[in-house]
Amino acid sequence: MSDMLKAFGTTGSTPTGPGYAHPLTEDIIREASSLLMEIPEGRRLLEYAKKNDITFGAITGRQPSYQVTDSHHLFLICPANTKAVDLEEMACNLGIGIREIEQPSVGIPRAVTGIAGQDLERITFNHMLDIIIEMCKIADEFVAVKGSTKLVDRIEKLGHSELHRGIRSGLPHQELANILSKTIKSV
Amino acid sequence: MNWHRLDREKTVDMINSVRSAAEALLFSPITSEAKCTRLPFYSNHLLYRLTNFASLPTFSMDFIGDGEKFVYLDGSALPILQINQLAGLNLTPDTVIPYLNFFFLNVRLEEGEIIILKNPEEAASIDIYDDERREDINLQPEHASIEQNESGTYIVKTPIFLDGTLVDAQLTVDRLGHVIVKSLGMMAHNQLQ
């Protein structure tokens, strides 16, 4: 469990102030960005965010996660007690959050309300597949650059180890989609 | 959990009550839905969930409230302890397990994810990302012992899933709802067979 005990900036639980902003917002963003800068895909994503005026915020929440509100705003969600947070997971969330904003520019539309049923299902599926592929790319680069397998372990826990193997072995996109489809149906 | 969906007017009232200027983008009355459910250990406060469907996956925030004032569950124990003090915590042998389930669902501990197991065998198959399982706060462990000492503190002994490990645990809950987790030791694999 010791690898889960790293903290951003000052350590330990900090009372939440008024609003939802995490009291350690600046530390969280600085340290997640700094970690992301250590890998090639991370540098590419941060450059994209800079060029496209994407601003980052952080709010408190139970599970480390992220939320894209529009094409210029990305919120990281981080537990109040940062000792319970894994830094690489937060860096990965920052990376895939930027990727989500980037998706429309590479032909993957955002899944938003108002899209008709089957189209929404297809769009959501393509969005999800692309985000998992991005997560695997970031995880593999952390293994290559830092020798850290924490994100790979997380991908396995999420049930995407077969998809990850497929990505590593260079399977075509359609075959990766088939694997994800099978994984979803088996849940 | 049995959720009750709030009507549009109450949803908008709730959003107006909880939205903050700094993070206004997270709250949209047009694309959000609010629902609430009863918690057996509170008599006049409910659990509220506000979900923004503007994009998929959806984004939810949970609050405890009395219909007018809402406290955001931010992943720390502070909001729950605050409500316990303000609204009163009704702990009984029947509500202590739901309270612990709720506490572990909403508080991110340094020790990692904690789930009270239905039985030790469940450790082999449990999925910590299964929200439906985790949100079943009324699920009672089959072999838990529940005792109360003279000061009103409950002591629960039960198998738990602690950051991926099956552990026999002693969970202590005082009258104000403070929770202490003590490992009584890892449970051997042969106890799963």
Image (tube, coloured by chain):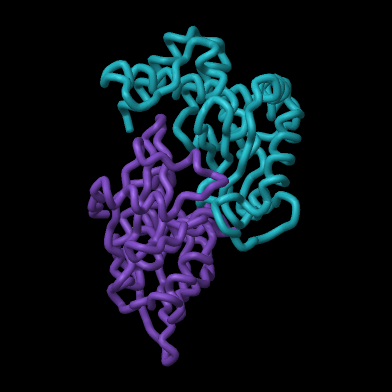
Chain colours: A cyan, B purple
- In the picture, measured across the screen, residue B101 lies left or right of residue B172, that is left
Residue at 52% across, 18% down: A103
Would you say residue B154 is visible in this rendering? yes
Q: Say which of B120 and B133 sits in front.
A: B133
Residue at 55% across, 10% down: A170
- In the picture, measured across the screen, residue A139 lies left or right of residue A180, that is right
The image quadrant where one finds the N terminus of chain B is bottom left
- In the picture, measured across the screen, residue A147 lies left or right of residue A80, that is right
Residue furthest out toward the bottom: B150
- In the picture, measured across the screen, residue A117 lies left or right of residue B48, that is left
Q: Say which of A58 and B133 sits in front.
A: A58
Q: Percent position (x, y) of residue A122?
A: 35, 17
Q: Percent position (x, y) of residue A12?
A: 67, 60
**Residue B23 in the image: above or below residue B44:** above
**Residue A173 in the image: above or below residue A69:** above
Q: Say which of B81 and B71 sits in front.
A: B71
How many marks overall? 0
Residue at 47% across, 10% down: A173
The quadrant in which residue B140 appears is: bottom left
Residue at 59% across, 55% down: A80
Q: Percent position (x, y) of residue B50?
A: 37, 47
Q: Percent position (x, y) of residue B111?
A: 58, 58
The quadrant in which residue B91 appears is: bottom left
Would you say residue B188 is visible in this rendering? no
